[in-house]
Each structure stands twice: as structure tokens, then as C-alpha cells.
Amino acid sequence: MTLGKLLFGGSVCAATFLALSVSAEAKRARCFTSDDGYFPCSYRAIDGAGSFRISAPGYPTYVLEVDGPGFAYGYVNLGRRNVSLPGQFVRSRDDGACWNNPQTNTKLCAW
């Protein structure tokens, strides 16, 4: 293997690592929950399936874990414990940034 190929391979690996690490950083967003209304928040993608975490000072941290395309389960962090949110969330057809829970009539959005 030539030095050029080694350097090229190393550059590709480094670029991939940087791209993956940047995508995991929290981003500023505007959030909405049925319980809390609108508030500025931090949005962090958890995986490639679309799972995410939103958090903000003075508000609970919400996590939605995508179970399959358009469907997710959630929980809320209340201090030192996580509490499962009842039912299943469905991605909104009107706004892809929102997830609705038809069983509890709740909504969670992050723009």
C-alpha cells in the first residue's frame, strides 16, 4: 500500500468521525409539548432512525425513541428518574417536526 493511499484512507476516516460527532451535538430549537407549551430548547439526535432528546432549563427532558418509520415511544426525565410516557407516538402528517400520541391526545414538537 502506498503512502498516498494510507493518507487518503486516514483522511476519509477522520472526516467520517467528525461528521458523526457533529451530528450528535445539541442544536438550538423551539419546542412545544402539550404540557409545557412553546419554549426554547436544545435538540439532540440520538441515532440515525430519528430518535431525539429535547431539554431546557426549567423543563423536563423528553426523549422519543423511534421504534419504526413514523412510530415512537417516549419518556420524560423528572430529576433523577425516567418515566415512560403512555401509548405510542405517531409522526404528524401535517408537520414532520411533531409527534402525536392518539391514546393520550398529547403532542411533542421540535423545530
Image (cartoon, rainbow, N blue to C red):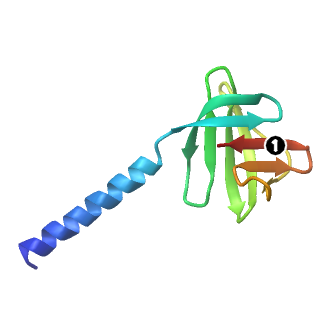
Is residue 82 visible to the viewer in this orientation of the structure? no
Q: Secondary structure at mark 1?
A: strand
Is residue 26 visible to the viewer in this orientation of the structure? yes
- Residue 80, horizontal then vertical, whole percent: 65, 26
Q: Residue furthest left?
A: 3
Q: In the shown orientation, is residue 36 left or right of residue 14?
A: right
Q: Residue at x 69, y 47 (%)?
A: 64
Badge 1: how crowded within 10 Å, few (<14), some, or many (20+)? some
Q: Residue furthest bottom?
A: 1
- Residue 104, horizontal then vertical, whole percent: 91, 44
**Residue 96, located in which quarter of the rendered image?**
bottom right
- Residue 67, horizontal then vertical, whole percent: 71, 60
Q: Is residue 27 above or below residue 73?
A: above
Inspect the image, locate mark 1, and give the three-letter code of the amino acid beneath it: Lys
Q: Residue at x 75, y 52 (%)?
A: 95
Between 93 and 44, the residue placed more toward the observer is 93
Q: Residue at x 61, y 22 (%)?
A: 57
Q: In the shown orientation, is residue 58 left or right of residue 35?
A: left
Between 80 and 4, the residue placed more toward the observer is 4
Residue assigned mark 1: 107
